[in-house]
Image (cartoon, helix red, strand yellow):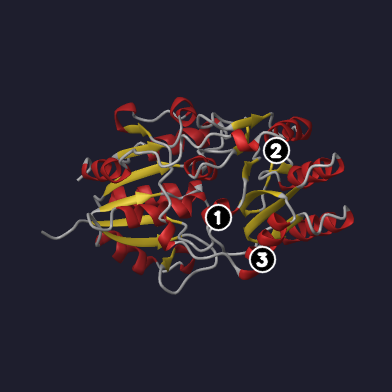
Amino acid sequence: MKKKKIILIGPVPPPSGGISIHIKRLSILLEKDFDFDFIDEANPAKKEYFNVRSLNIFRYLKKVLGSDVLYIHSGHHVLRMFHVLMGKLFFRKIILTMHAYPFNKGKLAKFIEEVVYGWSNKIILVNANLFNKIKLPRQKCVVQNAFLPPVMETEPEMPAMVDQWIQKAHAGGKLIMCANAWQLEIFNDEDLYGLDICIEAIDILKKKGHTVAFIFNVASTDKLKDLYLKYQATIKELGLEDDFLLINERLSFVKLIEKTDIVLRPTNTDGDALTVREALFLGKPAVASDVVERPEGTILFKTRDVADMVKQLEILVTNISSVSDELKGRSENYRELYKKLIESVL
């Protein structure tokens, strides 16, 4: 029997971010059940995938017409609506995953988006907050976090420079923290991913005598490159070159989690962060802002509150050996779950 053709639409790695990692893992998880193709939205474009940035409408339509299901993961509201509209226009089944949604939209814009999104056959919302705040047909909605277990054997090894830095830090007895960003963003006039407060927190912890280090990876510097360079200069000015590694690498963040000790998610807005769930899955302490509901086991600090962030980190670094790994290797059958979600619209 011929497998159904599923078009996964959204950013395809590299670079790696929460949504692109979800897309990659989903295609691997269900590769025996469905025939997957991709419409990539990431920058830069990659030769192996059709990218919407090419503006080749004929190739786009050919992919849509050759599919059974459009499985949309777009992070941009205009592209999200466009894909739903195309699916509706050409009578394709549509699954829409809402990974995040800004709630400061005007009433008219929000109304239009809710109407268009409601045309989907199935809508996956990654947390209950989205379910409660977006008016969508309830019978079509499923609340399901976006976490999928990492396929470690398919993950690339760490860049040699990063691996050597980690080994040197561990040899010096340092506990290594890590965090990441798809790209630098400003939201509500603040650093969305909290890189600034990570630098400040490490500076405070070092001055208090804690033996710690930090790796922060920004997957793409195509946006706000000046801000990235400013943070590099700040690290140097504070004398943290040996303790804070700010990099722009196309690396596997889950591999970085595996090699470090503590994972941070200091964002000032969020959906359902894969970073936090990956950390807990691998038995690593996860410290995150309280901007949204976090998975059980996450250590929370007040959003954008450096003092509270440092307080929680101090408690953790002095008691890290007692952190439980009971969430590691959770047994949920993700393959069966997503297979049924797709089959429900066919």
Q: Residue 123: tell me if it is visible.
A: yes
Instruction: Please say if 221 is above or below 268.
Output: below
* Place of residue 72 in the rendered image (x, y in percent of width and height, measured from the top left): 38, 49
Crowd class of label 1 (few under 14; some 14 to 19; many from 20; radius 10 Å): many
Tag 1 or tag 2, which sits nearer the N-term? 1
* Place of residue 335 in the rendered image (x, y in percent of width and height, measured from the top left): 29, 46
Instruction: Determine which quarter of the picture holds residue 119.
Output: top left
Tag 3 or tag 1, which sits nearer the N-term? 3
Kind of residue indicated by mark 2: Val
* Residue at 43% in and 37% down: 145
What is the CA distance from the residue labelled 1 to the residue labelled 3? 16 Å
What is the CA distance from the residue labelled 2 to the residue labelled 1? 21 Å
Instruction: Please say if 46 is above or below 212.
Output: below
Instruction: Determine which quarter of the picture holds residue 146.
Output: top left
- Give residue 340's mark: none
Residue beneath disc 3: 164
* Residue at 60% in and 68% down: 159
Residue beneath disc 1: 253
Crowd class of label 3 (few under 14; some 14 to 19; many from 20; radius 10 Å): few
* Residue at 51% in and 61% down: 42
Numbered disc 3: secondary structure: helix
